[in-house]
């Protein structure tokens, strides 16, 4: 007999499928008389939009004795009313068991389902009795057929053939495309689903069909006209049009989880898996009926595509587009790699763009186009690149030169000239310059998030670290001695106090860097650049906005500007044993080089690799020049003084001092203090001069000044006589050395 299995559905008519009721769509469910009781025209228009549907319901076979149930004594469960029936209702034509002539039959041996064996023949539903091919004509084989050349060709028995028919339990009235059209009562596109007859994924365009009832003129829904389109067919269309093009085109659903419709690579976004476990692929099986029982076809979200390089391009493009909100008019860069056995076999960059596609009937897709682009690598400098030596050489030489000058400077820290130059803060500045040169080595390497962030920290922190001792040294010099035209009041600024003044400036820079590390860090960003040649892919270090740049320009620029102003105000000091000219040259040099670097980096259109080389060279010039300005004149003064002392010793006679032609100015390393002369027991009256050994300056004024430690317990004051004899010079040198 013709059998149905548990869980299968069929249609049961209500009142012989002659009763009609309003269709479930919104227009048909309206109560036109209540809505438009006072307006006959609108009421008539409303009633014309009402559709009527034939009454029936879907029923499902109830399991009995864990086996199939014969049609004549089957127990049926009504899913809506949850009661049982002993008779079947409407039996669709496709549910009949059909013989070789296409006529319904219940006679055993005249209907079958395919089941290939070693002979590749067809069997009845028992799986053992072969179909009797006793009619004339060629046999129709199932499973594998042999061509004339002996090759095997797979064949699936899914249609009528001589001697039997594959009987499907199929009724369109409970298929999704039909029920959706009945509910909407308007043309529509279905969501992709598995076709019943060939187990392929596709979509259907459905249009409702009506007839007018002759008795009451009602518009009765009688069926659906449907057009099927497989996803393979859409993929074939894309392949045909984009097969030889470098572009990749993919169509995905707009709704989550964004299933793939088709692509120009041939990927359809479907796979056959076991019904019980979708993570296990369906095994290869020749028995089509058995495969249909244990396997099913499922769709693949585009984010899960991972087989091959092309699928990775599609998947990566989708994830990047989704992350950025699917911008319609913006190209997004996509990097993709294909790993086979953990070995990278392909790599490329594509420009990805999406556009939403909608159509009458409910299609809501997104078309995604991916085009390969050229990769530009001039934004980073790697070992082995042609530009690598131009970045590394200035950084290394600059740090070595600064450290060498620092060693020479500290080696002569006991000399009067170095003492007058305030060697502690000058040495701190030189050491900061060496570190700033070393910080330029962080510019080596690719543009990654970690390296971009480290460059933000190293370059800015060490620049402020080098600038701060120079700034406080200039400020203290101006605070103690003014501009050289006014006698300063007595005050003391010790080395410890000056050192503490440096800390807030450094901590403020650390605070700025810390805030922007979390708010807007310097990070690697992919970008696409357009020109007449095409599209180029770049990876640059950048911030989301210009706030960090503005804050650093204001803060660091303010330090440089104030330092330049203070250095300019002290330009009138005497030249002997003071650093005002060196301070002014250094600060002006830093301001000039920094301005040029800012202009090149932000105005001139160059790649970041070029900017980094320019930055390394700029730091080299700025630091080496500044260090030489401080150190070399002092070393030259030491050499000159040593030569003069040596010559004086050879010319001097016993009992007679050789006096210099002009008064000498001496700086005492005893802190910072300028005051009106107070008579001390050990003072020497004389010249109208005052000097600070740290600042290395001298002020001409009509009063006498004293120089002390800034520490009242050890204050030593030294003043000068208009005419210096040998004894006076020795006393001054002795005090300075102490």
Image: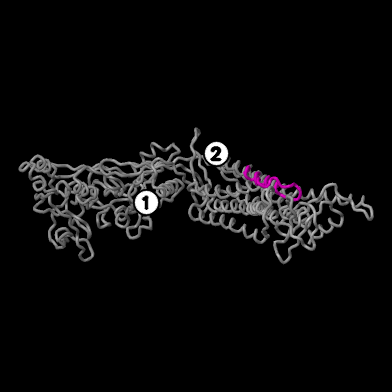
Viewer-nearest of labels 1 and 2? 2
Specify the farthest residue to the left. 215
Report the magenta residues as a range.
Answer: 568-593
Q: Is residue 552 visible?
A: yes
- 497 sits to left or right of 78: right
For disc 1, the neighbor class at 10 Å (few under 14, some 14 to 19, many from 20) is: some
Tell me which residue sits at (19%, 43%) in the image. Answer: 208
Indicate the position of residue 420 as horizontal and vertical percent values: 74, 54
- In the foreground, 313 or 75: 313
Q: Residue beneath label 1, please?
A: 301
Label 1 – label 2 distance at C-alpha? 45 Å
Q: Is residue 466 visible?
A: no
**On the rendered structure, is 372 left or right of 17?**
right
Q: In the displayed structure, would residue 133 be above or below residue 239?
A: below
Residue 702 drawn at (x, y percent): 74, 50
Q: Residue at x 16, y 59 (%)?
A: 80
581 in magenta: yes
Quick one: SS at disc 2?
A: loop
Callout 1 secondary element = loop
Residue 91 pos. (x, y %) = 15, 52
Magenta: predominant secondary structure element?
A: helix
Q: In this figure, which colouring scheme has been used for the structure?
A: one colour
Label 2 crowd bin: few (<14), some (14–19), many (20+), radius 10 Å: few
Q: Which residue is mark 2?
A: 603
Q: Residue at x 94, y 55 (%)?
A: 654
First in residue order: circle 1 vs circle 2 = 1
* Quarter location, residue 189: top left
From the viewer's perspective, tell me whether residue 19 is left or right of residue 97.
left
Give 74 or 51, whichever is nearer the viewer. Answer: 51
| Rendered-image quadrant of the C terminus | bottom right
């Amino acid at each position: 007999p013709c059998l149905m299995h548990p869980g299968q559905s069929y249609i049961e008519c209500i009142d012989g499928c002659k009763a009609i009721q309003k269709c479930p769509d919104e227009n048909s469910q309206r109560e036109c008389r209540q809505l438009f009781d006072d307006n006959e025209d609108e009421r008539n228009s409303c009633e014309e939009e009402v559709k009527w549907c034939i009454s029936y319901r879907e029923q499902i076979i109830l399991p009995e004795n864990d086996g199939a149930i014969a049609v004549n004594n089957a127990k049926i469960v009504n899913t809506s009313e949850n009661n049982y029936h002993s008779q079947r209702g409407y039996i669709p034509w496709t549910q009949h068991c059909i013989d070789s002539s296409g006529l319904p039959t219940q006679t055993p041996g005249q209907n079958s389902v395919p089941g290939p064996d070693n002979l590749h023949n067809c069997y009845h539903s028992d799986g053992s009795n072969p179909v009797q091919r006793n009619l004339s004509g060629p046999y129709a084989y199932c499973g594998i057929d042999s061509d004339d050349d002996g090759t095997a060709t797979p064949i699936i028995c899914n249609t009528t053939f001589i001697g039997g028919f594959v009987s499907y339990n199929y009724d369109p009235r409970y298929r999704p495309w039909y029920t959706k059209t009945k509910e909407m009562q308007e043309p529509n596109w279905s969501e992709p689903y598995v076709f019943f007859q060939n187990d392929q994924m596709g979509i259907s365009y459905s249009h409702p069909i009506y007839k007018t009832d002759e008795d009451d003129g009602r518009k009765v829904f009688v069926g659906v006209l449907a057009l099927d389109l497989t996803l393979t067919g859409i993929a074939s269309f894309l392949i045909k049009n984009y097969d030889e093009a470098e572009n990749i085109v993919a169509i995905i659903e707009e709704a989550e989880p964004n299933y793939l419709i088709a692509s120009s690579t041939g990927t359809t976004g479907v796979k056959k898996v076991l019904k019980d476990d979708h993570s296990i692929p369906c095994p290869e099986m020749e028995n089509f009926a058995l495969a249909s029982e244990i396997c099913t076809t499922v769709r693949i979200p585009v984010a899960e595509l991972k087989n091959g390089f092309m699928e990775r391009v599609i998947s990566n493009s989708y994830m990047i587009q989704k992350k950025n909100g699917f911008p319609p008019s913006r190209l997004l860069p996509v990097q993709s790699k294909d790993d086979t056995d953990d070995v990278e076999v392909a790599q490329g960059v594509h420009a990805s763009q999406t556009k939403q596609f909608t159509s009458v009937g409910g299609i809501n897709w997104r078309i995604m186009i991916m085009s390969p682009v050229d990769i530009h690598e001039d934004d980073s400098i790697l070992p082995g690149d042609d530009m690598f030596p131009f970045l590394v050489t200035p950084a290394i030489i600059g740090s070595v030169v600064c450290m060498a000058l620092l060693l020479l400077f500290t080696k002569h820290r006991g000399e009067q000239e170095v003492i007058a130059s305030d060697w502690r803060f000058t040495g701190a500045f030189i050491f900061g310059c060496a570190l700033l040169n070393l910080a330029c080595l962080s510019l080596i390497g690719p543009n990654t998030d970690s390296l971009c962030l480290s460059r933000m920290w190293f370059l800015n922190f060490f620049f402020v670290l080098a600038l701060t001792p120079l700034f406080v040294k200039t400020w203290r010099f101006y605070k103690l001695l003014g501009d050289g035209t006014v006698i300063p009041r007595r005050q003391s600024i010790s080395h410890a106090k000056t050192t503490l003044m440096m800390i807030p400036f450094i901590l403020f820079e650390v605070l700025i860097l810390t805030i922007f590390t979390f708010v807007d860090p310097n990070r690697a960003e992919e970008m696409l650049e357009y020109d007449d040649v095409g599209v180029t892919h770049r990876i640059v270090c950048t911030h989301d906005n210009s706030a960090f740049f503005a804050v650093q320009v204001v803060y660091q620029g303010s330090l440089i500007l104030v330092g330049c102003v203070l250095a300019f105000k002290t330009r009138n000091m005497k030249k002997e044993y003071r650093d005002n000219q060196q301070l002014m040259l250094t600060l002006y040099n830093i301001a000039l080089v920094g301005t040029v670097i800012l202009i090149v980096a932000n105005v001139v259109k160059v790649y970041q690799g070029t900017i980094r080389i320019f930055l390394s060279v700029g730091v080299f010039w700025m630091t080496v020049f500044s260090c030489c300005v401080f150190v070399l004149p002092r070393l030259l003064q030491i050499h000159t003084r040593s030569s003069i002392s040596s010559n004086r010793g050879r010319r001097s006679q016993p009992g007679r001092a050789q006096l210099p032609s002009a008064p000498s100015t001496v700086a005492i390393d005893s802190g910072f203090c300028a005051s009106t002369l107070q008579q001390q027991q050990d003072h020497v009256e004389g010249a109208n001069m005052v000097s600070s050994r740290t600042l290395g300056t001298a002020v001409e004024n009509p009063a006498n000044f004293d120089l002390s430690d800034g520490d009242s317990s050890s204050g030593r004051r030294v003043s000068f006589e208009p005419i210096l004899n040998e004894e006076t010079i020795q006393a001054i040198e002795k005090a300075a050395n102490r």
